[in-house]
Image (spheres, rainbow, N blue to C red):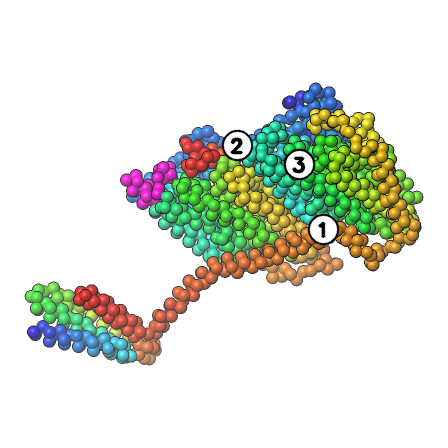
Amino acid sequence: MTLSYYLVLAAILFTIGAVGVLVRRNAIVVFMCIELMLNAVNLTLITFARSTGTVDGQIIALFVMVVAAAEVVVGLAIIMSIYRTRRSASIDDANLLKY
Amino acid sequence: MSDFPFLIAMIAVPAVGAAVVAALPRGRDLLAKQVALGVSLVVLLLAVLTTLAFDVDGERFQLTTAVSWIPDFGSEFALGVDGIALVMLLLIGVLVPLVVAASWHEADAGSRPARVFFAWLLLLEAMMVGVFAATDVLLFYVFFEAMLVPMYFLIGSFGGPRRQYAAVKFFVYSLVGGLVMLASVIGLYVVSTSQLGEGTFAFDALRQLDIDPDVQKLLFLGFFIAFAIKAPLVPFHTWLPDSGAEAPIGGSVLLVGVLDKVGTFGFLRYCLPLFPDASRSFAPFVLVLAVVGILYAALLAMGQSDMKRLVSYTSISHFGFIALGIFAFTTEAATGAVLYMVNHGLATGLLFLVVGMLISRGGSRQIRDYGGVAAKAPLLAGAFLVAGLASLALPGTNSFVSEFLVLIGAFPERPVFTVLATIGIILAALYVLLMYQRTMHGPARGVLLQEDPAEPLPADPLPSGGGATATAARTAPHRTLRVLDLSRRELAVVAPLVVLIIALGVYPQPLIDLIEPAVVATLGDLGAPGGTDR
Amino acid sequence: MPAEGLLAASWLLIALPLAGAAVLLLGGRRTDRWGHLLGTATVVAAFVLAVACTVQLAGLDERAADVELFTFIATGELDVTAGLLYDPLSAVFVLLITGVGSLIHVYSIGYMAHDPARRRFFAYLNLFVAAMLLLVLGNSFVALYVGWEGVGLASYLLIAFWYTRPAAATAAKKAFIMNRVGDVGLALAIFVMFAQLGTTSYAGVFGSVGTLAGGTITAIGLLLLLGACGKSGQFPLQAWLPDAMEGPTPVSALIHAATMVTAGVYLIARSAPIYDLTPTARAVVLAVGALTLLIGAIAGCAYDDIKKVLAYSTVSQIGYMFLAVGLGPAGYVAGLAHLLAHGFFKAGLFLGAGSVMHAMDDQVDMRRFGALWKKLPITFATFGLGYLALIGFPFLSGYFTKDAIIEVALDRDDVWGWVLGGVMVLGAGLTAFYMTRLMLMTFFGRARWDEGVHPHESPSIMTAPMIVLAFGSVFAGALLVSVLPLSGWLEPVFGEPEEAAHVVAPALVGLVVTLVALAGAALAWLFVGRREVPVTAPVRVSPVTRAARHALYADAVNESLFMRPGQWLTRALVWVDNRGVDGAVNGLAAGLGGSSSRLGRVQTGFVRTYALGMLGGVVVVAGALLAVTAG
């Protein structure tokens, strides 16, 4: 029964992250919400790994962390440079890539 | 001598020539022109030698060469000619040098350097030879599509004011047809795989297949639509007037004279032998398209004010005659249709060239901007008249023989269609003579009238691009018509065509002897009464 | 049988003038100085050769010579050999063409002396002679067709000779187009022959035409007739011939009076074996001939343009010939005799008209002539003899040949025979009326010349051919009917002439025709001889005159039935093609482009919109997965 607690927590965290991505404008906050979603997924992976007694989920969680770290580097750099040119961290102001 | 790979040489020589011309340094345009002329003359020589090496009574496909190409698909770089392809190669050989000579100065006026023009022209020649000489269906398809590229650039870089529109329309239209054909080519491959155990694209193997009639119909339509666009038959024709009008004159000549013949050549080479049942069941529909095209395009030609559009529409009308000849399924009509392809290339080629020479003098394509030119330029008018008379198939010109053969051959099988098509010869007289009368006869008028007779003309007038200034000049008593007659260069372009038109009009039998065996063999594949299998 | 001797070289008849035309056209200005002499020499040489050939032909037992030249077109079942057939019928035409042709070439040397393009004129004339000889000498319908369109081309070039005049250019085009309408008929007839008989040569067709069904033969006959009508200016294709007078007058004389326009008669006479089998087609020939005879004669009465009057007279006279050849075996010879006589006197009349125009600064309006007989005595004399021959003055050409046709018609001894005879007698009266009117207005009365016109007689190089033709006008008829009977000469072609059982005595026919002609002439004198001729044509005239002045509204009918609807159709089709067909193509392209750019609007650039889209997608996929696993 302990399994469902972890999964519910992960689902709540994921939902918070997803809603945050959809409703917040500040790029940093959106970024944090994405991290939140990733970690919710990590939590799910580790939960299942623990319950089945295999290490596959833990390995994938490690991969996710590595990718997330790399993504933070690139993403923050992009947000910084956009902020420098437009004096704004709102993602709605960076809408040049359209039709 | 027949061991010499003539066909590969006829592709390689212009292709290499194109590369050489393109690689010439900037500013060496004259050298580029000379090289292009030399290369095209070599190809003409090769075409003549090929004809001499060809044995009329021999195998159906001769001078064959096959090089392994894409073995995984069972496709070879296989070349070979029958009489039909051979006369088309001769036509290419004759027309390209003349086009090079005719474009000598015109190419300078394009948006790109002249050497680029001649490089594309030679590449186009290589592709055209390939498309007629291929005996592998996939290879044919590749040449069929590759041919578009040089033509696209010739129109798009060197054409008239609306060249971009025309080039894109030409390209997209042909590409759509080509893709439909590709589907059928793949379908053929699939059928050959299931019947022969091993897939092949070789024409000779494919025509032995026994394809289910329903499958035949689908595959036939794929080829037919591609060829009907290329030829073009009504209602797939609207790209031709735009391309014919906007292309540089040399491009128009090759476009209408040779390129479009791939369509009618395809009917005869691929549609009939590969899909005999489908050909027979679709023949009435094709004949309707052909006859409608003859009359409809002729009426449209009369309504044109732009000379190049007019000539393009006359060609659509003529293609109707060719399609009529092919789908009548008699030896006389089909031989006439093949002869028509050659003759139309010469006659309409000359008509386009002469119209181009007139346009280069006045800078306008509109009929109303000219009048009374014959008085000052009798040679130009004479060449115009010969071309026009050949276009209306007057006896004594080559077109008469082919038109007569098509009609007399089609009549026993399809009397109603033939009678309707015969009415087309009245319309042909109308559109030719209307244009001739308005530009050459009557009092002097139009853009060639000049205020001050003392003012000297430029040595060789160049097109000023469009008729914007054209309508300004109107008849006024103190103006005189100032127009140069044909120069020596132009005369050298026109004279061979005039000679050929009349010679083939009086003594066409050598060409007929060349064509007939291939036509009989093709109709034999079809199982038509006019042919025997061999 | 194959030709031997000179006859084997009869291809030279065509080659000579053709070479002349080629030299003159290709030689350019270099040949300006002697071009007219070369052009004349080739035709004269052809005439000499033709005489020699005919003499040789007369000496043969079987009077026909085949000359096989080369294989023209041979494929499948079709085998067309380029070959000539020199038989009595073609010999008659060859002599007429080269003989009258030579005279007119000589005349043209003088007539065109001051024209800068005289060389071109002779080149075209030579081209015409070559094509016309091919027409009559060819041994197959295809060869005839080649010559047929060839003379059409030459006629086009010559009518449009003064092409800077819009009227000339338009008339030339009209002539060519209307001829082409007829050519379609001829072409279709050839197609039917090939489809049914597998051959197009005279020998092959005439040898097996009897095996065909009656309907097919009638169809061939009617299609040939359509071709003949186009070339000969017969109803309903008669409207081009008067307009063709825009060409130089020698052209009108040679092409549009003596030779080319009689090609239709030649065609029907040559196709006698076909027409002999189809009374229906023959009846139509009769109807066409009778109708055209009257149309031409009525229109001729109203025109003031001297050449147009002669042109309508030609239309009318060819109507006589059609009528004659439509009458059957007995009529062929009569028709051809009239054709030959007409060739002489009408060519002479046209040359005379040319001489008058030459004198009057190219004026053609007869209302501005008058009293010319003193100034132009030779022209007057030769013209007058031609006039008398045409109206059938006793013992001149027309008297013999025209009366012969009327006799043949009456010999039918049925109602139609009397109707046709009556039509021809009426036509003779009308002919006398309009020709007398022409004579009176041109040569008699008060001088109504334009200011500054000083009439003078033409140079002898022009009058000499006129004199020769005047002799022909006087004697040809008698010669052809009694001294050197044409019926005997043509016997190998048309068979033995049967002794006619005359219903009405020839003398009586002659008397009646002469009296009617005299009445016509008297009527003309009442109208124009007795009182002053106004210089401008009266405007208030009877409806009959008005209709005649418009040639019974032939042009109006053509315009309203064909030209206007054609132009309308053309304009409509151009619209349909640009808006409809091309519009559909461009519409398809524009539709694709438009919808893709509209679809592109979905890319707003707002990251959160994309995120919502992804969420929606995930929900849908997850929902679908759940539905599949649960369901």
| Image quarter hosting the C terminus of chain C | bottom left
Q: Position of residue C525 (x, y in %)?
A: 89, 47
Per the image, label 3 sits on a secondary structure element best described as helix
Q: Residue at x 24, y 70 (%)?
A: C619
Instruction: Name the residue type under label 1.
Output: Ala
Q: Relative to residue C598, is residue C424 drawn left or right?
A: right
The disc placed on residue B519 is none
Whether label 3 touches label 2, CB < 8 Å: no
Residue, disc 3: C279
Query: How many angstroms separate mark 3 from mark 2 (CA)?
Result: 31 Å
What amino acid is labelled 2 in the image? Glu
Q: Nearer the viewer, mark 3 or mark 2?
A: 3
Residue with the mark numbered 1: C554
Q: Residue at x 53, y 44 (%)?
A: B417
- In the drawing, does residue C618 fall left or right of residue B153? left
x%, y% of residue B286? 47, 47
Q: Identify the residue at horizontal 71%, vertical 37% (top origin).
A: C326
Q: Which residues are magenta?
A: B188-212
User: What residue does disc 2 label?
Assistant: C77
Same chain shared by disc 3 and disc 1: yes
